Image (cartoon, helix red, strand yellow):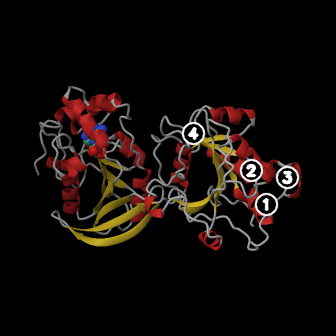
Amino acid sequence: MDTSFPHPLISHVITSSSLHRSYGIHHSARLGLWKNKVWNSACCAVGFSGVGIEDVFDDSNLKINENGSLLGALNNNNESSSASFETLDSEITPETTNFFVSDAEGDPDCPSKGYSSIEQALNALSQGKFVIVVDDENGDVEGNLIMAASLTSPKDIAFMIKHGSGIVSVGMKDEDLQRLNLPLMSPETEDEDSSAPTFSGFSCIGWLAPKLASEHTLPIGSITDLIRYRRKREKLVERTSVSRLPTKWGVFQAYCYSSKLDGTEHVAAVKGDIGDGQDVLVRVHSECLTGDIVGSARCDCGNQLDLAMRLIEEAGRGVVVYLRGHEGRGIELGHKLKAYNLQDQGHDTVQANIELGLAVDAREYGIGAQILRDIGVRTMWLMTNNPAKFVGLKGYGLAVLTPITEENKRYLETKRTKMGHIYGSDLQGSLPGFNDSIVNNGDSPVNT
Ligand SMILES: Nc1nc2c(ncn2[C@@H]2O[C@H](COP(=O)(O)OP(=O)(O)OP(=O)(O)O)[C@@H](O)[C@H]2O)c(=O)[nH]1
C-alpha cells in the first residue's frame, strides 16, 4: 500500500468514525459500500466481529501490527485474501490558476471561529494524526474522526472505536470491493444524499467533538471551511455538454456544467465568440422557478432573466449563467413559498426568512465564477444590483439593470434598505455600448 499522503486533501480517502452520544461499540460484523458524491468516490464501511473488538484492543495484536494498517490487520486475519488493498485516488484535478472567490464568502485560508484551518488539518493528516471534522451547516451537528487510511495502525482503530460510534469507514476501489464481494450498504439508486453513509440511529452530537479535540489535542475542522477551501483551489465544475440553443431572443450555445461538489447541473447560455474574455456582458442568475417559469409578479427574477437574454442578444456577445440550487436565495422552493405566506401577513422578504429561522441569503457564487472562467470570461459587465454578486464574482464591470414594476416595488425597496442592493438611481453613469433607456433610473418600469 502506498503510504505517501500527497496534497491536496482527499487524494486518499480516509477512515472515519462518527462521534456518537453513546460510547457503545458495535460487535456485529458490518461491511458495506456506499457511493459518496462529495468526494466522487466509492467508500466502504467496516464494523468488527470477525477480527473481534477484543483483538483490536489486545496489546499483543497491537505489537504484531504496530506499523501495519487496519487493512493489513484484516489481511493477516484472512490468509485466503492475498491481494493487497489500495485506497482510492481522488478524481478531482487541482488547479494552479486562481479562481476568483468572494471575499463575502470569507477568506478560504482563514477558518471559521473556533475551528482549525484546513492547512492545519492537512498537516495533521499527512503526519498520520487524527482530525475531527464537524458538519456545522445546521443545528444537528455531526462529527467525524478521520485520518489517512494509509497511515492507520490498530491502535488508531481502537481509538476510533472507543471514541466514535464503533463503525469505521474506509475508501476502497470498486475492483477490491467486487473481488471481496462486498455489498452496497444501501442500493445505489437510493443514494440521493450520499455525502454520508445512511446508518440508522446515527445521530451525532456537537458537544463531544470539542471535548475530544481538547482532551487529545486534535485539530477540529469544519465542512464549510473545507468546501470553501476546495472551491478556491480545485476545479469543481465539469463541462458535460454543449449544444446549439435557438431561443425566443436569438441563437445561443447552451453549456451544461455538473458540480463536483453535489452533482447539481447548471447551465450557461453563451452568445457569440467570447474570444479573449475581456469586457463580456454577463448575468449570473439565481434559479427562481416562480419568477422565471410561471411569471410570478412577486419578484423581479423573470424580468431580469428576460432583460439579460435580450441585452446579450443585442450585444451579440455575452453569457447568462443560470445557477440551480439558488432557489429562494438558497432556502429552496418550499421554504420560499412559506416565506410568501408570511409576506402576505405583512412580513417583508427579509423578515419572512428570519421568521422561518433561515438565512436571509444563503447563496454563494464560487461555482458561477468557475463556470465563467471555464467559458473563457476574464473581465465582465455584470448585470446585477446585488453587491454580494459582484463581490462574489470579482467582476470588473458593473451595469445596473433593474426593471421595477408595481408588484415588486416593495420587494425591491426592502432589498435596497435591508440588504444593501443598489438600483439605477444610486449609481452614476451607465453601461457603455448600450442604449441608456434600458438602464433603469429606478422610478419606472423598463421598456425597451
Ligand atoms: N427567500 C426568498 N427568496 C426570494 C424571494 N423572491 C425571490 N427570491 C429568490 O431570490 C433569488 C433572486 O434574488 P434577487 O435578490 O431577486 O436578485 P439577486 O440575484 O440577489 O440580485 P440581482 O442580480 O440584482 O437580480 C431567486 O433565487 C429567487 O427565487 C422572496 O421573497 N423570498
Quick check: is the Cβ at mark 1 less than 8 Å away from ligand 1?
Answer: no
Q: Earlier in the sequence, mark 3 or mark 1?
A: 3
Residue 147: give x, y in percent of width and height: 69, 51
- 180 relative position to 380: left or right: right
- Closer to the camera, 439 or 166? 166
Q: Which residue is mark 1?
A: 73
Residue at position x 57%, y 61% from top?
33
SS of the residue at dot 2?
helix
- What SS does tag 1 mark? helix
Image quarter where the N terminus lies is bottom right
Identity of the amino acid at label 2?
A: Ile
**Residue displayed at 55% across by 55% down:** 233
Q: Which residue is mark 4?
A: 204
- State the CA–CA distance, disc 4 to disc 3: 29 Å
Residue 221, x across and y down, in percent: 61, 42
Q: Mark 1 vs mark 2: which is more N-terminal? A: 1
For the residue marked with disc 4, what is the amino acid?
A: Cys
Q: CA distance from mark 2 to mark 3?
A: 10 Å
Residue in the foreground of this view, choosing between 262 and 197: 197
**Which is more N-terminal, label 3 or label 4?**
3
Disc on the earlier residue, 4 or 1: 1
Say if residue 372 shows up in the picture.
yes
Q: Position of residue 360 (x, y in %)?
A: 35, 34
- Number of numbered discs overlaid on the protein picture: 4
